[in-house]
Image (cartoon, grey):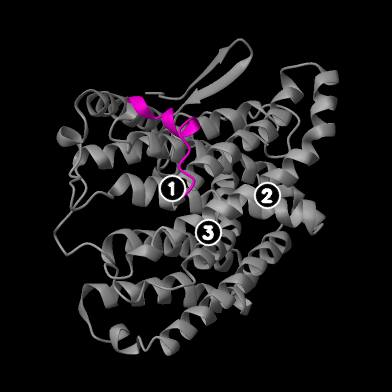
Amino acid sequence: MNFYRCFRIFGWNFTITPGRFIMTGLVAIMLAIVSIRLLTGFGVVTNLSDETPWGLWIAFDVMCGVALAGGGYSTTLLVSIFRFDEFEVVCRGALLTSLLGYLLVLAGLFLDIGQWFNSWRPYFSWGYSSVLFEVFWCISIYTSILTFEFFEIFTERVLTKRLHRYIVRVLPIFIVIGLIFPMMHQSSLGGLFLIMKERMFPLWWSEFLPLYFLMSSFFVGSAMVGVESSFASKAYGHGIPHNVMKKLTRIGGCIMLVYLLMKIYDLFTMNLWSYVFQGGLQSNMYCIEMLFGIIIPIIIIFSPIADTKFGLAGYAWLTVLGVVVNRMNCVFTSMYESGSYFPSAGEIFISIGLVSAGALVYAFLVENLNILGRKHAVQINVHKNKDIRSLIWAFVRPNN
């Protein structure tokens, strides 16, 4: 039985595959749970409490989401400011991934507001002394700028060429402004933990936390570009030249190396080595984070292993997972006692649903706009017999 259907409505294409059908179902479940959460509050859907106010939505949807969406500003900085023109091939894909990431972050922030109907208040009641206020405003402004930058791609197909030319002329101004805000809120998210010294496990607290968050968002940005390009290559045959991807990730690797040296400096200056080897969940999670998320990726990217496609993919995935583990450790492992909090099924399904929604929108836009350097919409090649790998990737290989 053929489950692959390509729909065309008003000139826009979208193909339903088994993977996308499953993701659509997950989005529907998410919307149902979101409705319950908005009507009943936190009590029914979440396991949040006054003792554990930060849950999965803050740790994964916001903290991890903001970091993983850093590919947009990092590649823009390299191309537009430092003039690495060879990286232009990844700019549009990074921009789309970053925009979708920030939109999902805003959705996560909205859901984590206790009285969601008061979500408009930060726009009018300014809390100058609040770090979260600064984070909220920076994320909101930067998301608006990303939307405008993406609008330039949208106008290539939909609106008049004259309007497109006007947008292209003013776009550099927004690009320069847009580079300021992510650096502010990426570091400010780390600044949130500075006042929690007495509560956090010593291995994760540092005066350099704002800088750590900013640096990690930069090097995970290039790694995220690698992950996104691997999916695009499998689904759409869009490959990035190996030498370009290697150079981009090595720039991130240099930042990662400085990050590691600063972490070692903290261990010496604050006499934390005893915590590293004391055993237990917290010290073990720290060792896992540093070994698999930092040390091994550095070895890979500065060794001949990086000359292989498998090596670059391994570096990208380990770096992304390492930053995810770091953010989860900062929120959960470092502050919560073991067993004091575990996300509810509602929290988990909402997070999975948000990721699924982002993947579906990404697929729709890539198939209809010039995201991957193609002048025409991507067409999906449909076959009756598909292997398991096609379902895992959740996309179908298109015609070249």
The location of residue 395, given as percent across then percent down, is 49, 37
In which quadrant is the C terminus drawn?
A: top right
- Residue located beneath label 3 in the image: 187
> Sequence-wise, which precedes: disc 3 or disc 1?
1
Kindly identify the residue that appears in the image at 39 percent across and 39 percent down. Answer: 109
Q: CA distance from mark 3 to mark 2?
A: 13 Å
The location of residue 206, given as percent across then percent down, is 42, 73
From the viewer's perspective, tell me whether residue 157 is left or right of residue 249.
right
Q: Which residues are magenta?
A: 117-129
Looking at the picture, which amino acid does disc 3 mark? Answer: Ser
As for residue 379 lying within the magenta part, the answer is no
Q: Nearer the viewer, residue 371 or 41?
A: 41
The residue carrying pointer 1 sits among few (fewer than 14), some (14 to 19) or many (20 or more) residues within 10 Å by Cα, namely: some
Q: Nearer the viewer, mark 3 or mark 1?
A: 1
- Residue located beneath label 1 in the image: 132
Q: CA distance from mark 2 to mark 1?
A: 19 Å
**Circle number at residue 179:** 2
Q: Nearer the viewer, mark 2 or mark 1?
A: 1
The location of residue 358, given as percent across then percent down, is 47, 35
